[in-house]
Image (cartoon, helix red, strand yellow):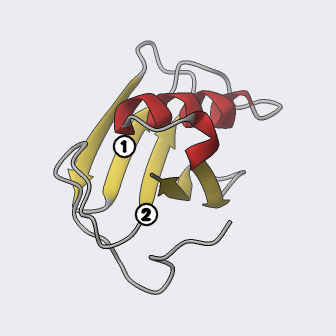
Amino acid sequence: MPCTCAKEVIYPFADKEWRRNGDCADIMVRVTANARKASVEMVNAGSYRARVDAPAVEGKANARLIEMLAEHFGVPKSGVIILSGAKSKSKKVRIVQ
């Protein structure tokens, strides 16, 4: 999927607000699986913390993370792509408008 921001960094999100330099943005997400309460919060520019209420087995936490980020940023689930860190707590995620 081509992205016009592939070579430029789009920071910060002013929590849910897009900077319109392109149609996507790459963010870093630190994930805590099996949390009691699901939440997404901005830590600093371009960096988020997500508490996922699904276990980290068979991709369940990643699937739930995609749902949560899609809802948080107001994009479809197909607009959230895990670029790296699929089996790690730290993930690089692309949000496509």
Which element carries disc 2, helix, strand or loop?
loop
Give the residue at x 63% y 72%: 2
In the image, taking residue 73 as reference, residue 33 lies left or right, namely right
> Are the residues flagged by discs 2 and 1 in contact, CB closer than 8 Å?
no
Give the residue at x 70% y 52%: 86
Q: Is residue 14 above or below residue 75?
A: below
Task: Tell me where residue 19 sits by quadrant.
Answer: bottom left
Mark 1 nearby-residue class (10 Å; few <14, some 14–19, many ≥20):
some
Find the distance from the CA under tag 2 to the CA under tag 1: 23 Å
Counting residues from the start of the chain, the first of labels 2 and 1 encountered is: 2
In the image, taking residue 49 as reference, residue 89 lies left or right, namely right
The amino acid marked with disc number 2 is: Asp
The amino acid marked with disc number 1 is: Arg
Please state the horizontal and vertical placement of residue 83, each as a whole percent of the image: 64, 63
Work out whether residue 77 or residue 89 is closer to the camera in this orientation and state it: 77
Q: Is residue 84 above or below residue 30?
A: below
Q: Which residue is mark 2?
A: 23
Please state the horizontal and vertical placement of residue 43, each as a whole percent of the image: 24, 50
Work out whether residue 80 or residue 32 is closer to the camera in this orientation and state it: 80
Q: Quadrant of the N terminus?
A: bottom right
Please state the horizontal and vertical placement of residue 40, each as a whole percent of the image: 35, 33
Q: Is residue 72 above or below residue 92?
A: above
Which element carries disc 1, helix, strand or loop?
strand
Among all residues in the image, which is located at the extreme right? 58
Please state the horizontal and vertical placement of residue 21, each as a whole percent of the image: 30, 73
Give the residue at x 21% y 48%: 17
Q: Which residue is mark 1?
A: 49
Mark 2 nearby-residue class (10 Å; few <14, some 14–19, many ≥20):
some
Give the residue at x 43% y 20%: 38
Among all residues in the image, which is located at the extreme bottom? 7
Q: How many marks?
A: 2
